[in-house]
Image: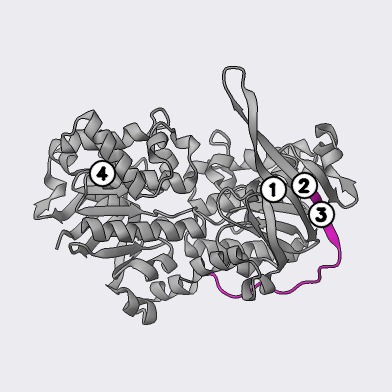
Amino acid sequence: MLLKINNLSADFQTESGVKRLLNNVRLEIGPSETVALVGESGSGKSITALSILGLHEQDRVTCRGEVLFAGQNLLKLPEKALRRIRGNRIAMIFQEPMTSLNPVYPIGRQIIEPLMLHQGLNREQARAMAINLMAKTMIPDPESRMQSFAHQLSGGQRQRVMIAMALACRPDLLIADEPTTALDVTIQSQILELLAELQKEFKMAVLLITHDLNMVGRIAERVYIMNQGEIIEHGRTAAIFTNPGHPYTRHLLNSVPHGEAPIKDATEPLITIRDLKCYFPIRKGFFKRKIGEIRAVDGVNLTIYKGNTFGIVGESGSGKSTLGMCLLRLNNCHGLIDYQGRDLSAMTNRQMRPLRRELQVVFQDPFSSLSPRLTIARIIEEGLKIHNIGNNRGERLRLVRQSLIEVGLEADMAERYPHEFSGGQRQRIAIARAICLKPEFIVLDEPTSALDMTIQAQIIDLLKELQRKYNMTYLFISHDLHVVKTLANQVAVMKEGRIIESGPAHEIFSAPREEYTRTLLKCVSN
């Protein structure tokens, strides 16, 4: 075996005592093999991967057991010896490339660094190889992109840069920690195909850490199921998926979104959009003269009916999120936005302010949308104070606790801070903040994209229940067509700022008219 983990245990030192993170984990990976490590958030997947390379917090996490790589126990190696292995013989693709890439340096410099450090190349040789790697990972115009910064790339391009960095030294083992999380289906498919091609070319083994069971079924030869820091089941992927032995494995497999949203009456329009446009200028030079424009939303027409869920799907950069922000008047735009007889596009910010209570939003990343300095109570209470809901703080706190209970959390969680919660819990808090105001309309911008399957299923059920209870209307923006299919009554497909196809969800999914829609659906079914 290339990698053999024997009885790996990890303890985390907290203020209240020691917490067990991993308990006697056993895992093996052969040369050129693809092995998946699957489990919910908090199950111990990432800490297992970080322990292989000693990347966890050394002063707070204590590991015991063996991590044998090519016969060497990595847990016993000194830091200097480990550095020679990291990025050289074992490389890692991290979950969120935007936080893993240095925002200060161009991406070319970041790919060149491991080549010079581990391969002993001079700068010119390393630059030539970096351009070649970027071309292999299908980054357009790689030579000019060498000077780009991380924020100037799309999510898919940033992930390709991370892959290029990881493969720079042709490692024997690649650890891919959620490599396609939050990427749209076509980019996911491209990234997986790319990894498979490069794995074959470089003859490397891959440890795939993910919560996406569809991905595991497509590319992994063997799978390990993890729960609460323990491996509870492992075997050939096909055997585990067709005949799971452990109840937790069956629970995971049953959590994959399936079914269709019910067909609802579409008789009472809540929001009507006509010829909506949102253009962003491209400026260049010392005087920042306008040399062009990005047509993020380009002449969109659609009608959202009361009590329904309208799904917007499309690739990254298609204009989905921009459209949602336009409806809330959070982006400058032109055209008609008719909300119950009122044209929102003609209103001033002052006129819009009272309507903010009725028009709410839940963002993709709850961690960045919840203030780390405020307690949950203060975060949710803020909207109540602005809109003069509740006679005093005691009344407002009662409403805060009630909204937390409605989203499946405990009332006493109100005095805690966002960093003390899991990703799924933070998303529930973001939903509680929105529903506390009892809005008519909520824009849900990729609310489940970074959550594991079981948490996704819980959030979907929660959104359905809240909609039944309060007859709220949703605009559900997502690249996950499985989720859209289970939640949306109507669907619109966006491409390059335009709606190319729309209609009842069951018609779009069963008989798409446009080739682009068929391509999106094909990427999901593969």
| Residue named by callout 2 | 276
Disc 2 from disc 4: Cα separation: 45 Å
Secondary structure of the residue carrying tag 4 is loop
- In this rendering, is residue 219 above or below 285? below
Residue 233 in percent (x, y) is at 30, 72
Q: Earlier in the sequence, mark 3 or mark 2?
A: 3
- The residue type indicated by label 4 comes to Ala
Rendered-image quadrant of the C terminus: bottom left
Task: Give the labeled residue for mark 4.
Answer: 168
- The vertical placement of 343 against 150, above or below, is below
Q: Which numbered marker is on residue 323?
A: 1
Magenta run includes residue 272: yes
Q: CA distance from mark 1 to mark 3?
A: 13 Å
Q: Residue at x 54, y 65 (%)?
A: 519
Q: Residue at x 38, y 69 (%)?
A: 218
Main SS of residues in magenta: loop
Give the mark nearer the N terminus: 1 vs 4: 4
What's the amino acid at mark 1?
Leu
Mark 4 to mark 3: distance in Å?
Answer: 50 Å
For the residues labelled 2 and 1, the Cα–Cα distance comes to 9 Å
Mark 3 touching mark 2, by CB under 8 A?
A: no
**Quick check: marks 4 and 3 in contact, CB under 8 Å?**
no
What whole-number distance in Å separates the C-alpha atoms at marks 1 and 4? 39 Å
